[in-house]
Image (cartoon, helix red, strand yellow):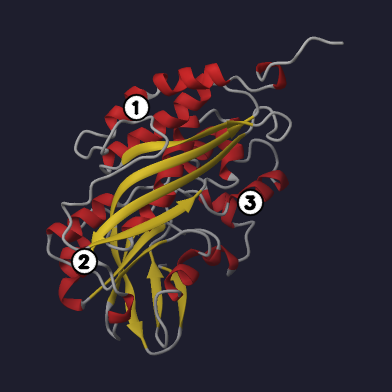
Amino acid sequence: MAGKLTYQQAGVDTRKAAALVGDIKGHVKRTQQNRKLLGAFGLFAACYDLSDYDQPVMVTGCDGVGTKLELLLEYDLLETAGKDLVAMSVNDILTTGGDPLLFLDYIGIAALDEDKITRVIGGMADYLEDCNCILAGGETAEMPGIVPVDVLELSGFCIGCAEKPDLIDPTTIALGDVLIGYASDSIHANGWSLVRRVLKEMAPGTVTDEEMAAWLQPTRLYHDVVADLKSSGIKPKAMSHITGGGLPENLERLFVGMGADLEIPQWNLPGIEKLLEHVDAEDRFHTFNMGIGWVAIVAPSDVDKALSAGNGGHILGTMTAQEGVRVKVSS
């Protein structure tokens, strides 16, 4: 009879995983400079005290990095993967008017790789520190035979809170309200299945390393825009994170019986014309953010203040009676 097996021989090293928790404590500590958990990090669940809120309403969101992850792994941009993971969920929390409080991650990997995982978590902590959100815990799962070698599975989960009167209410949108768009930093983390398909059809070297680096920049975290809107006393009628579906689909979900004709600036991302020339002229607006990653809908009286919130603000158009969102690029 063969010798008895250990969990490690089956491909899972629980002792190594326990050591990793200690290794990432420095990153966790960075995310607790202003907010702190109620109780210690590393317990089986995380607690947060909401007593500072008078009428707390919890808000939640979850997302991933999508197929962009394949190229981030290929180009060894693991910190970017961590930033994308945070931004995709935190930005969604911000659209509600809520504060992102706690973030949790899921990492699936064939065999524990401390360097890779620590780099991903380091990128997460960079963004979480920026937006005052705690890295409250997560799950690192060794999945031999399920997750391919040299692949990571990533999912992120964010929990936020808002005072009930501060919640954004899209039902207040009215005809004549103004749509303010804020610049994206890159393609962000949507549309990469199409990007990858186009890259396969291009001749090698068509996209330079510098252009690919620009395309792969992390998703912009729009907490600066939201914080500036709040500090200036503006409560937007609605806010939208422009992800899969582009401007039309992400905006149309906010209102009924109205629409908008939008004119957006030229997308100045290096080399982006090489991608767009391979993409259907209409479908591009339903796939990519086209240079606008965030939209706030505000009353006409709030336009000037909204334009100075964060950076990269542009007037895109106004709410009209014709249903649907139509987008064109400035000539």
Question: According to the image, label 2 marks what residue?
Answer: 166
Mark sitting on residue 27? 1
The alpha-carbon separation of the residues under discs 2 and 1 comes to: 31 Å
Type of residue at label 1? His
User: Where is mark 3, residue-wise?
Assistant: 193
Q: Which residue lies at the image location 13% right of the left edge and 57% below the top edge?
A: 231
> Considering depth in this image, is 301 or 64 the residue closer to the camera?
64
Residue 68 in which image quadrant: top right
Q: Residues within 10 Å of mark 2 (few under 14, many from 20)?
A: some
Query: Residue 159 versus residue 228: which sits nearer the camera?
Result: 159
3 vs 1, front mark = 1
Among numbered discs 2 and 1, the one appearing first in the sequence: 1
Which residue is at 50% across, 27% downward? 117
The crowd level at tag 3 (other Cα within 10 Å; few <14, some 14-19, many 20+) is some
Q: Residues within 10 Å of mark 1 (few under 14, many from 20)?
A: some
Is 300 displayed left or right of 19 in the figure? left
9 sits to left or right of 87: right
